[in-house]
Amino acid sequence: MERIDLAVSTVIFALRPEPHRDLMTLRLPLVRRIREPYEGRWALPGGLLSPDRDLESSARATLVRTTGLTPRYLEQLYAFGGLDRSAVETGRVVSIVYWALVHADEVAQAIDSDNVEWFAVDDLPELAFDHRTIVDYAVWRLRNKMEYSRIAHGFLGETFTLAQLRQVHEAVRGSALDPANFRRQILASDAIEDTGRRLTGTSHRPPRLYRYNTAVQLADHGPLTPSKEQA
Amino acid sequence: MERIDLAVSTVIFALRPEPHRDLMTLRLPLVRRIREPYEGRWALPGGLLSPDRDLESSARATLVRTTGLTPRYLEQLYAFGGLDRSAVETGRVVSIVYWALVHADEVAQAIDSDNVEWFAVDDLPELAFDHRTIVDYAVWRLRNKMEYSRIAHGFLGETFTLAQLRQVHEAVRGSALDPANFRRQILASDAIEDTGRRLTGTSHRPPRLYRYNTAVQLADHGPLTPSKEQA
């Protein structure tokens, strides 16, 4: 029987403040391919499924190796298995794709290498294989399928200001929100609560810090137990 | 490198009226295994990924072969790839699982065989492999993740009465709904519209037939094109 290989890849999203823009940009890291097919093209971090790892821990291991990232939030996105997605040279590959949201402090730990670069999702280079389709699908899921509160939790730390939370929403939407309306709606929703603390810094009126009301689990796996093996 | 096999399986849901109960039951077909491992146990319909088919058409081909079913609604559910899920005899298998909703008239076309049987989801036999975990996850997704209107669309035809729609909601919830409240809420939601026609039958006051307001696509694939190859 013809061999079908199984790969695990990950779309990793992070938000980056831009010096000359109001909105942060939604970015993802890509890895430059150093061999054929598609040598020199950018691709999602990934690799063949390790025989001794489950799917999630294989995704994590590849991420550490290629980008240095260990995202706290990692969830299965979709399996891609079309007949036309692989190059003739490599034979058929089915890719199980994960997606991750990383905080700014996690991005700072990424490997600094010529072969890893962060790109804005609305300004991507030409990608290898069908990775552009995969990225488009992941961006669509991020924008449409997750509740905003959970998205924010993936990008922010345990506590955050209302302005930080609004900036996450704005970056994922790709457009600005009215601060007063946002404030009214988010406080009315009971999704977050005041920690009683304020952001420490130089301001003489430091903003309040909020946290999620309940222990919101970003990835709701239902009856599935998330992978116990964490890289 | 150690070989990892790739299987495609499907959880198929249908609703069945019960003569002595008000609620319909949520049911799924299982196939009796005719070889080791787990010979004699019930399992989800599935098989190894065909080298010449994409994931969805492989799921469809297996469904036709094992159950005779060709569901209109079929969507990818999750990929299961834990290290402990396979039997030692078969080596490691990663399963990409689809789920399907079928109408009563589709169920009527199912293969009549000693090795295929429909079970109520709350009264399942012992299943092979980790298929119980997979079924539990699929039931959880059905109950929690899909909008009710879309669930109904998967189980009903193009037009339906309010009573039929309520019965679908009740069966998936597993509990009865107040007919007057249900009627008020569903009509207020603008999800459905009156077709102007009535159910033909013996009643002297036949109930109105409704349809969805817009062409609601049950599986919203976003930028992904659904498989063109349909078995």
Image (spheres, coloured by chain):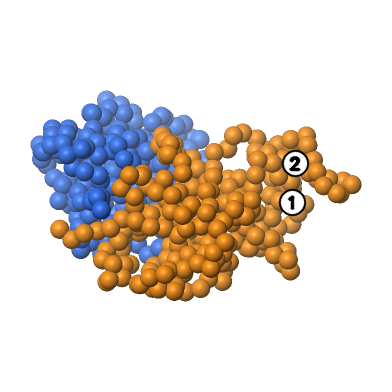
Chain colours: A orange, B blue
Element class at badge 1: helix
Q: Nearer the viewer, residue B205 or B149?
A: B149
Badge 1 density bin: few <14, some 14–19, many ≥20, Cα 10 Å: some
Mark earlier in primary sequence (2, 1): 1
Residue at 31% in and 52% down = B74
**Amino acid carrying mark 1 in the image:** Ala
In this figure, which residue is indicated by the disc labeled 1? Answer: A163
Residue B24 in sight: yes
Residue B143 in sight: no
Question: CA gap, disc 2 to disc 1?
Answer: 10 Å
Using residue A183 as the reference point, say whether residue B128 is left or right of it: left
Percent across and percent down for residue A75 are 46, 47
Residue A209: give its label. Answer: 2
Percent across and percent down for residue B33 are 14, 38
Element class at badge 2: strand
Percent across and percent down for residue B96 are 30, 49
**Amino acid carrying mark 2 in the image:** Leu
